Amino acid sequence: MSIITREEIKRLVNEDNEIYISLYMPTGITGADAKQGQIRLKNVLRAAQDQLIEHGYKKPGIEEMTDSVQKLIDNTLFWSYQGGGLAVFLSEKGMCYYQLPVEVPELAVVSDGYHLKPLMQLLTEDGHFYILSLNQKHVRLFSCSKHFASELHLEDVPTDIETYLKYDDPEKQLQFSTHTPGGGGAVRAASYHGHSVSDEEKTNLLRFFQEIDKGVRKTINDTNAPMVLAGVEYYLPIYREANKYNGVVADGVIGSTEQMQLKEMHEHSWNIVEPIFSQKRKEATDRYNEFKGTGRTLNDVEEIIRAAYAGRIETLFVALHEQASPDNRDLLNDAAIQAYIQGGAVYVIGSDEAPDKQEVAAVLRY
């Protein structure tokens, strides 16, 4: 499983295959309801297999091509950890899949390119964020939208401090396990927001968090989405000292993440990032109005398509609504994807929010 990043979208757009199979389904299900996920993926896979037959593929070849999806269906552990949706992309060369923090429709598309339209809501600048849950026993990273949170696997790092210290320095692990914060006359302690922390504990936490930061940056790659830190209060300034990811926001969710439900952590985090998203959108709209009439803005669909493919779009506002013609909806999606993979900011908005009340508007780089 990979996280959806600009580079991942670019890779999917630029893949050179004979056939492209795109499968989508909602997965807001856990535990006893997880069987529904297996049934849904089986249904969309069957729909894709029928389309492959229509494209002239024979049954043995289809079964061989889709075997990796069948294995995913049969993996009961996989269905225990889901967020809002699942996207699976398959070709004659292999399969990749993405657990999404947003709901997507149940859909199978066999075409001459991957169907990326359902991912549009993840490309926008104002909706995707991360939560990093800090805990000495289990650090967890979540990819989130307003309504969903999907846990991500932190790559190549121990997610508990005792494991990290055991491999880094067994003697320090023993000392860390036996010292208590502020205890022992020979151990000098500093105060972090009312919590007494020995120099040794602070040093161990800092080194552990530096490893976590490396894993976080490797996992989320090139994204710059906001990240909310959650944990007991004295962890947060120590993690900020270790952190090199630019998206960590000033406010955090304070409390023991061992005792906090994910739903509560997610709600508090959304309350922190929502004003940030609103401000970014306002600034983008103000910039459009500032450049209007200077040749740096567009609101014609065909002109915007050309500018998107030329890499000229700095910011794109797209109103994806059912009143638009199907051809225009597809063009708008193509424009949004091209703008996104070439470094532009994309905002998916309602028709009444669009600059100049147009279904598409853009600020150009030049």
Image: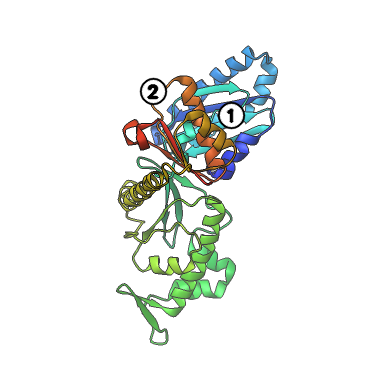
17 and 178: which one is in front? 17
265 and 186: which one is in front? 265
Color style of the picture: rainbow
Number of marks in picture: 2
Residue at x 35%, y 32% (from the top left corner): 357
Residue at x 65%, y 28% (from the top left corner): 91
Asked if residue 205 is positioned above or below residue 326 in the image, the reply reads below
Asked if residue 202 is positioned above or below residue 32 in the image, the reply reads below
Q: Secondary structure at mark 1?
A: loop
Can residue 1 be spotted in the picture? no
Q: Disc 2 marks which amino acid?
A: Glu
Residue at x 59%, y 44% (from the top left corner): 7
Label 2 vs label 1, nearer the camera: 2
Q: Position of residue 157 (x, y in %)?
A: 56, 58
Q: Position of residue 346 (x, y in %)?
A: 46, 41
Residue at x 55%, y 37% (from the top left corner): 307
Q: Residue at label 1?
A: 114
The quadrant of the rendering that contains the N terminus is: top right
Q: Residue at label 2?
A: 322
Instruction: Work out which residue is located at the far bottom of the displayed protein and give it.
Output: 186
